[in-house]
Image (cartoon, grey):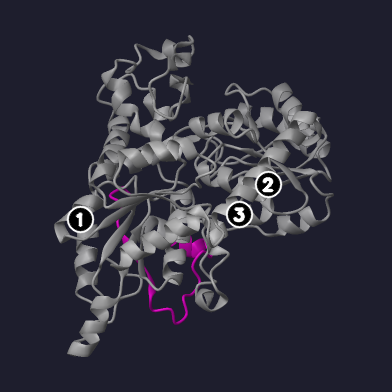
Amino acid sequence: MVLTQNFIRTSMDSSTRAAAEKQAHVVCIPAPSQSHIKGMLKMARILHSKGIFITFVNTEFNHKRFLKSGGLQSLGDVASFRFETIPDGLPPSDADKTQDIPQLLVSIFEKRMLPPFQNLLAELNAGTYQVTSILSDGFMPFTADAAHSLGIPIVLLWTISACAFMGFYQFKNVLERGLVPLKDESYLTNGYLDTIIDWIPGMPDIRLGDLPSHVRIMDPVDTLFHYFVECTQRAADCTAFVLQTFDDLEQELVNVISSMFRTVFTIGPQQLLVDQIPLDRKEGLKSIGYSLWEEDKTCLQWLDSKEADSVVYVNFGSITVMSAEQLLEFGWGLANSNCCFLWIIRPDLIMGESAVTLGVEFMDAVKNRGLISSWCPQEDVLNHVSVGGFLTHGGWNSIIESIIAGVPMLCWPFFGDQTINCKFMSDEWGCGLEIPNNVKRDDVEKLVRLLMDGAEGKKMRNKATEWKNLAKKACAPDGSSSLNLDKLVLLLKN
């Protein structure tokens, strides 16, 4: 095991040991993907600002990417915030591309990371500060075994919406009620996914196809399906868990989930809480970024040249992949809308393609009003005055960041929780619309124009602004998220 920064191993006199025993030391371990790392890092920074010693655990693969992207340049003299690594149990792969997510989840499900994680905890406990609790991503269920073996509390951080958590939680019920597995692939397109489910508390009349996409199985022993069942069912074993949302946005579901589990904290949006960290508590941690991809910040200068609310920001996240045909449909839809756009196209966005090309004709058509970049500082972009709309895959980080920027959305869900996020975004929160899965350029053109210039787009923008103000209220000193954060800190320090 390679430790990024070793703890100082020294013998301690009784006074030093007594002081160490009073110090809360939380080990934070995210699920090994971009959005989960970002959510956990923000929570770790918030807790550190409250006087908690943090050890942040990345996989070796992701930590190398983190270092390469500039996400971690130096921690200076901050001895109370450290990074450590464990192997992920996968064979070597391209260091510049996202790992095979299904194989990564199988590795987690099979607990390949548990032994190295336990070894790391043992090393940490041999140092100055004993580990007092674990803050684990909810999608890393093996961490509960490690916590229970040490007799320490474990708090789960769900970097997803309350509606997504409830959707995943229903997988077991859907299986037991015989709604899955599907009989064959025709059930994906013959209308069966429109089957109404009317028995989920807090989710009246939702469709089967609105649940997270991993519910669409044809094998009753599908590994990934049962991985998600285990993750949500084991939530009952934790001391508490945190949902990265705020009460006003998902009040009914938060009430339901709170009645099902012992201690539930809604703490979000996280960035609004990060922004409140006093300057003296931020020193030394300024160099910590959140991206596994190197960010191109020159796009912000391009945005400076555009009028207010005139640019569509397009980003399908760190995992979504599409066909070359789908890329062209999106591209020409954007071109034909005559709107300005900033489009993030990762090197590995296209399935089976090593290079992405939209053609000379396309580039000529969007000259001076379209900019393509490989990655960018998303929150800075969304908060730029020129950005008036967001075409997104519907990942939770993207949706919550768009909400706190007051930017309405178009959503093209790819997989996982994105389907249910987009459902709630359009039907419950009123700040976005969904693009059909079988994307066509005419639909993209029509919806982009509606988003940027239509009456419905204005209505969605007003609704996004309402949610932005409610999010600020939740994170005010006496707001629900701030009060829940105080309760979490008290739990972790005792």
User: Mark 3 sits on what residue?
Assistant: 472
Which mark, residue 146? 1
In space, the residues marked 3 and 2 are separated at their CA atoms by 11 Å
Q: Secondary structure at mark 1?
A: helix
Q: Residue at x 43, y 78 (%)?
A: 78
In space, the residues marked 2 and 1 are separated at their CA atoms by 41 Å
In space, the residues marked 3 and 1 are separated at their CA atoms by 36 Å
**Relative to 160, does residue 81 appear above or below in the rendering?**
below
User: Mark 2 sits on what residue?
Assistant: 406
Q: Amino acid at mark 2?
A: Gly
Residue 63 makes an appearance in the image: yes
Q: Nearer the viewer, residue 481 or 322?
A: 481
- Let me know if residue 69 is in the magenta part: yes
Q: Amino acid at mark 1?
A: Ala
Name the N-terminal-most of marks 3 and 1: 1
Q: Is label 3 or label 1 in front?
A: 3
Q: Residue at x 49, y 39 (%)?
A: 251
**Relative to 212, does residue 92 appear above or below in the rendering?**
below
Residue interval drawn in magenta: 64-92
Residue 50 position, x and y percent, is 43, 70
Residue 142 position, x and y percent, is 24, 48
